[in-house]
Amino acid sequence: MKYLVSVFAALALTLSAFAQDAQSAAAEAAAALSQAEEVPAVETPKPKYWTNTVQTNINFGQTYLSQWAAGGYNTVTLAGNIDASANYAKDKMIWNNRLQLDYGTLYSADKPIYQKNKDRIYFESKWGYETPIQHLSYSANFDFKTQFGDNFKYGTPVSDGTTEPTKQDWLDARTIQSGLFSPAYINLGLGLLWTPKPWFSLNVAPLTGGVVIVSDEALRDKYGMEATAWSDEAKTTATAWKSSRFEFGAQLKADASWVINDNFTYTTQLALFYNYLTPKVEPRITWDNKVFWKLAKYFALTVSTNLIYDPLVKVKDTDNDEVADAKGVQFKEYLEFGFTYTLTHKR
């Protein structure tokens, strides 16, 4: 009996010592855990669906002549450009927006007035949703084009030969050529967008509705507005020109953009519009090109061209200013060097 009591006593002492060791180990582990540094949780980055880019250019030019035998005039030119884009892409949907603003002035010593040599507002919005066919999407394309203000053609003022024409004489001799919403082109097309390459896209919109607006009555005949006869209360006949023209047809628009490197890019857009309502009239064609060459961190060389063929717009013959053709090719080219800054943001 005494032997069993001794065994149980020894076992109790052993269990007590083991319990004290286990309690001590647990306390040490708890202390170690409390002193350990907390590891921050790794957050999953949020997906970025928008990419925004704003490119600005300011260009300045100047010519000064003093007793120059070959002749010429002192000139000053100042022009600015903003090219902004906001593009959205998520799953099978894309939505690309681009706004181009151009404005420039010219001052020449032979005319005591500032002349506008560059003026353009162009906004385009393209929406697309992928179809089961690779590189093909359902699309909607909206574009708007006009300019900021009036543009004039300056004739030679009448002078008596004894005094130089005044500024007011030059202003009286000018004739308006275009203005804000004179004209303005608004189009919305539904169709398909084909993007076989990241740098090329072709939009075919067989259902395209458009409006051509000419707010200035003096310019409506030039831009193809129709005239209607009406009579007032005195029954005298006059002519009223419609300020807008509705168009419904098909539009084809091709876009390409080559990024040679971070400093050299070339973009081009060719658009053709055929009006179902005037089937015998040729399509309207516009072709825009832009070469951007960044020569230094904040300086760049830009070459841009705009070509328009509109069979409804009357243009002057370049060889005979008195002859107005029923149609003709309009072409404009700019070569500019100046300050540039680009801001890119993703969110």
Image: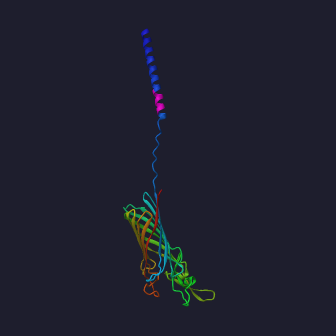
In this picture, which residue range is highlighted in magenta? 25-32
In x, y percent, where is residue 113? 54, 79
In the rendered structure, the answer to whether residue 252 lies left or right of residue 151 reads left
Is 1 situated above or below 310?
Answer: above
261 falls in the magenta region = no
Q: Foreground residue, 102 or 195? A: 102
Q: Can you give x and y, in whole percent of width and height, for residue 185 in the image?
A: 49, 74
Name the one closer to the observer, 97 or 339: 339
Q: Which residue is drawn at 46% across and 32% down?
A: 32
Q: In which quarter of the image is the N terminus?
A: top left
Tally of marks = 0
* Image coords of residue 139 (percent x, y): 43, 65
267 or 81, which lies in front?
81
Q: In this view, does 303 lie to the left or right of 183?
A: left
Q: Which of 99 and 131 lies nearest the eye of the viewer?
A: 99
Name which quarter of the figure residue 7 lies in. top left
Say if residue 216 shows up in the picture: yes
Q: Residue furthest right?
A: 233
The dominant secondary structure in magenta is helix
Q: Is residue 86 visible?
A: no
Is residue 30 shown in magenta? yes
Q: Which residue lies furthest to the front in this view?
A: 67
Q: In this view, does 344 lie above or below 64?
A: above
Quarter location, residue 280: bottom left
| Relative image position of residue 133 (x, y in whole percent) | 37, 62
What residue is drawn where x is 42% and y is 59%? Answer: 92
